[in-house]
Amino acid sequence: MTDLMGLQNKGILTLGIREKTNAPIVVVGTARGGTSMMAGALNQLGIFLGDSAYPPVYEDLLLSNAFEDNDLEEVAKIVGRYNKAQKIWAWKRPSSVNYLRDVHRSLVNPSYIFVFRDILSTANRNLLSMNTDIFPSLMHALNDYNLALEFLTDTDVHALLVSYEKAIQYPEFLIDEIITSFDLSASPNQRIKAIDFIRPSKSEYVLNTTIKIPHDFDPDAYLKLNPDVKNAGVDPVRHYIDFGFKEGRSYKKTSPN
């Protein structure tokens, strides 16, 4: 009789071999696609996520901004500091799918966790939290996953591919796979906390990531006030929702006193 347990799909696939036990871990996905949950679980396992990484999103804007400003000298300084201070560390930034090759060149033998979530669920979260149109959000998620797959196809890396939905269904399996794959020395208590963290739409995350475009948002002014966004050729509304709001970017011209 076929061993049905061996055929059970728990939504995790391991690619490649981890070359260094203290190599950094990069968490990749699409916005509102489960990367915050994954980063939070790593945090519960005792992994450092950056000087400016705080709950509920756990994004280190110091390193993120350095990459997105194309300031590779600053990237090298931050990475060098983290490598020196931490046995192992991680960095989470969904938009890194747009510059993963720069990330891979800037880190020493990094490993990856790619989180894949049902795109309709992701787009609907954007609709509920950000009041964004459903179809552009669906296309945005598809494009992000396409970029991730192009990178995985072209680059020989060690990576965990994780289904968000299966992670929710099998949290113990996910955490044990992470501990094993990255050779973590997590305590039993850290393991229990990480397993408990794997829950959908945690209230703190939902409340802290729910915004609407301000009624006086001026797309043209946003691009003029944020030339890096203009130079990147990205949609100003999309950028404000995904990054500008959290980064406190100006979105309208102010009247002189």
Image (tube, rainbow, N blue to C red):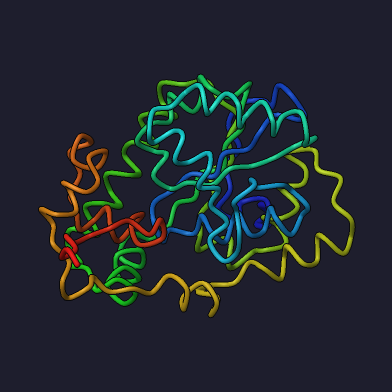
- Quarter holding the N terminus is bottom right
Most extreme residue toward the left is: 220
**Front residue of this view, candidates 57 and 5:** 57
At 19% across and 53% down in the image, what residue appears? 222
* Residue 234 x, y percent position in the rendering: 20, 44
Look at 59% across and 56% down and name the residue there.
38
Residue 9 visible in the snapshot: no
Q: Nearer the viewer, residue 131 or 148?
A: 131
Q: Is residue 146 above or below residue 43?
A: above
> With 46 as the anchor, is 185 left or right in this view?
right
Q: Quadrant of residue 113?
A: top right
Residue 12, x across and y down, in percent: 58, 48
Depth order, front residue of 78/190: 78
Decide if residue 14 is on the left or right side of residue 233.
Answer: right
Report x, y in % for residue 189.
87, 64
Percent of width and height locating residue 79: 62, 29
Q: Is residue 204 above or below residue 27?
A: below
Task: Examine the rendering and report whether any part of residue 173 can be seen.
Answer: yes
Q: Identify the residue at image location x=54%, y=47%.
A: 92
Q: Is residue 241 above or below residue 96?
A: below
Numbered-mark total: 0
Front position in the image: 221 or 206: 221
Quarter of image, res 37: bottom right
Q: Quadrant of the C terminus?
A: bottom left
Relative height, residue 229 to residue 155 (above, below) = below
Q: Is residue 3 left or right of residue 130?
A: right
The quarter holding residue 191 reads bottom right
